[in-house]
Amino acid sequence: MRQIFEAELRQIGDDLVEMAQLVEQAVAGAGKALLEADLQTAQQVIAGDHEIDALHRALDERCVHILAQQAPVATDLRVVVSALRMSATLERMGDLARHVAEVARGRYPAHAIRATAQPTFAGMAEAAAEVAREVTVLLSTRDLELAGEIEKNDDVLDNLHAQTFATILGPEWDGTTQEAVDITLVGRYLERFGDHATSIARRIVFLVTGDVDEGPTHD
């Protein structure tokens, strides 16, 4: 029985990594769609979110089944409950990538982000893609040093997010109301992506060390 239970726990870990890989692809695609006004990529990101949602549901069902049938305790319980929370966080990250792609699709063939703000959003898209890559690796390795790097990259996204407000509130801004709304929304979506990645990093630290981070989890 213990061997079966351990196999189920390993499958949960594999499912989380698979979700993270899909999210990684989604955020990279969303950034491309946004910056290049790439309609085909935007459509792929939007359609691909259904696969992330399906994995989320399957993983949650697996975790609930384990809780009901195995009644895990101590470290095993911590693994299952943390997996439930991280699965929900990854699903939200997929939603954020979809939202960015939807904005890009909605403004096609024009660019959703006007030229003056493009450098800032290029930086945000790059930082979000790097955070997504790190989350995938972190879920595979549980590397505590990498968990710290994810929080640092979240700070980069926060700083770039502040620059988006400086752009639309600056004296040189002459964009339309719709352009201001798009910059505000997309900036928030990308900034929240970093928050959710930080939440996963903190949960991995908890799994490995048992220490509870007192900071916000951004769930």
Image (cartoon, rainbow, N blue to C red):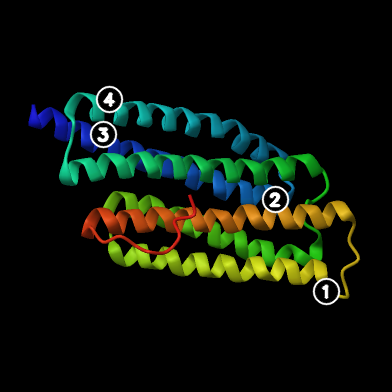
**Figure quadrant of residue 197:** bottom left
Give the side of residue 95 with respect to residue 137, left or right: right
Residue flagged by tag 4: what amino acid is it? His
Helix, strand or loop for disc 4: helix
Residue flagged by tag 3: what amino acid is it? Gln
Identify the residue under disc 3.
11
The image quadrant where one finds the N terminus is: top left
Residue count near mark 4 (Cα–Cα under 10 Å), binned few <14, some 14–19, many ≥20: few
Separation (CA) of disc 3 from disc 2: 34 Å
Residue flagged by tag 2: what amino acid is it? Leu
Which mark is in front, 2 or 4? 4
Would you place residue 137 above or below residue 19 in this image? Answer: below
Q: Relative to the observer, which residue lies in front, 72 or 173?
A: 72
* Disc ID at residue 34: 2
Give how far across and how far down residue 137 sits, in percent. Answer: 35, 53
The residue sitting at 44% across, 66% down in the picture is 151
Identify the residue under disc 1.
170
The residue sitting at 44% across, 56% down in the picture is 217
Give the side of residue 157 with respect to residue 168, left or right: left
Give how far across and how far down residue 17 sits, in percent. Answer: 35, 43
The residue sitting at 49% across, 39% down in the picture is 91
Identify the residue under disc 4.
65
